[in-house]
């Protein structure tokens, strides 16, 4: 049965930065979400560990039904954050869907065995250590687009030549395969997920947001 009681105006989960809280609550929409708890006994009957079902349910309680603006890469990311039946094995680990893509893709968006948010392409590729990190990256991209005086996109091998000396990693995005860097007057997003997950180095891409003042560099 769908959750029809939730307000369409989301309340940001605790623990996000002020910038990400504003992004979720101003730009996000909460839609009715499917409950996972009602499937618990049936899924256990199919051999899915109770702990993995609880993990998917915790994701759904925190993020389920949240629709956010498109990401600037990965063809926009999940349309709506939404967990589904865990899949995997004790040997390989268990994962579950983070939500369906906005367009047909060569991979899906998943929450991995260790809670990382990533893509299931030719192989599992974690992008951010948690879903919070993914949402923080979305919020930072939206903020950077709004305040930057220039946006430069760099692709393929040229990304490896980016000079990151003097730049600091942005910790709140919890970057793994993907990372964000803060320079003197710029923010740099490096998207390695498709290059790694699809074994396609030509898909490597960086976005450099330039001409940022102190507010533009941080935004809360």
Image (cartoon, rainbow, N blue to C red):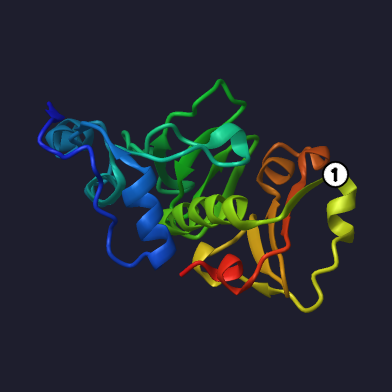
Front residue (pair 36, 90): 36
Q: Is residue 106 above or below residue 212?
A: above
The residue drawn where x is 38% and y is 34% is 80
Q: In this view, does 99 lie above or below 16?
A: above
Quarter of image, res 5:
top left
Left or right position of 16 against 145: left
Give the total number of marks visible in the rendering: 1
Q: Where is residue 65 in the image (x, y as percent from the top left)?
A: 28, 37
Left or right position of 61 against 145: left
Q: Position of residue 9 (x, y in %)?
A: 24, 43
Which element type, helix, strand or loop, lies under badge 1?
A: helix
Q: In this view, does 115 lie above or below 153?
A: below
Front residue (pair 181, 220): 220
The residue drawn where x is 66% and y is 56% is 148
Left or right position of 106 against 24: right
Residue at which label 1 appears: 156
The residue drawn where x is 25% and y is 46% is 10
Quarter of the N terminus within the rendering: top left
Q: Where is residue 142 in the image (x, y as percent from the top left)?
A: 54, 50
Quarter of image, res 17:
bottom left
Q: Residues within 10 Å of mark 1 (few under 14, many from 20)?
A: some
Q: Is residue 164 above or below residue 78?
A: below
Q: Position of residue 147 (x, y in %)?
A: 60, 57
Residue reaching furthest to the top: 104
Front residue (pair 68, 35): 68
Left or right position of 39 against 109: left
């Amino acid at each position: 049965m769908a959750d029809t009681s939730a307000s369409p105006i989301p309340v940001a989960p605790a623990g996000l930065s002020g910038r990400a809280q504003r992004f979720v609550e101003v730009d996000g929409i909460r839609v009715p979400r499917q409950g996972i708890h009602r499937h618990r006994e049936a899924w256990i009957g199919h051999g899915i560990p109770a702990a993995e079902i609880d993990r998917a349910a915790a994701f759904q309680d925190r993020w389920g039904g949240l629709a956010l603006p498109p990401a600037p890469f990965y063809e926009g990311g999940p349309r709506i954050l939404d967990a589904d039946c865990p899949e995997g094995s004790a040997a390989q680990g268990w994962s579950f869907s983070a939500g369906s893509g906005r367009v047909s893709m060569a991979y899906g968006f998943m929450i991995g065995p260790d809670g990382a948010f990533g893509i299931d392409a030719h192989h599992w590729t974690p992008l951010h250590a948690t879903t919070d990190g993914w949402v923080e990256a979305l919020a930072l991209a939206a903020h950077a687009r709004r305040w930057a005086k220039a946006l430069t996109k760099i692709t393929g091998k040229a990304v490896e030549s980016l000079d990151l000396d003097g730049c600091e990693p942005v910790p709140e995005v919890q970057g793994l395969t993907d990372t964000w860097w803060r320079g003197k007057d710029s923010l740099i997003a490096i998207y390695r997920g498709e290059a790694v997950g699809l074994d396609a180095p030509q898909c490597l891409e960086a976005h450099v947001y330039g001409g940022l003042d102190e507010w533009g560099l941080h935004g809360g």
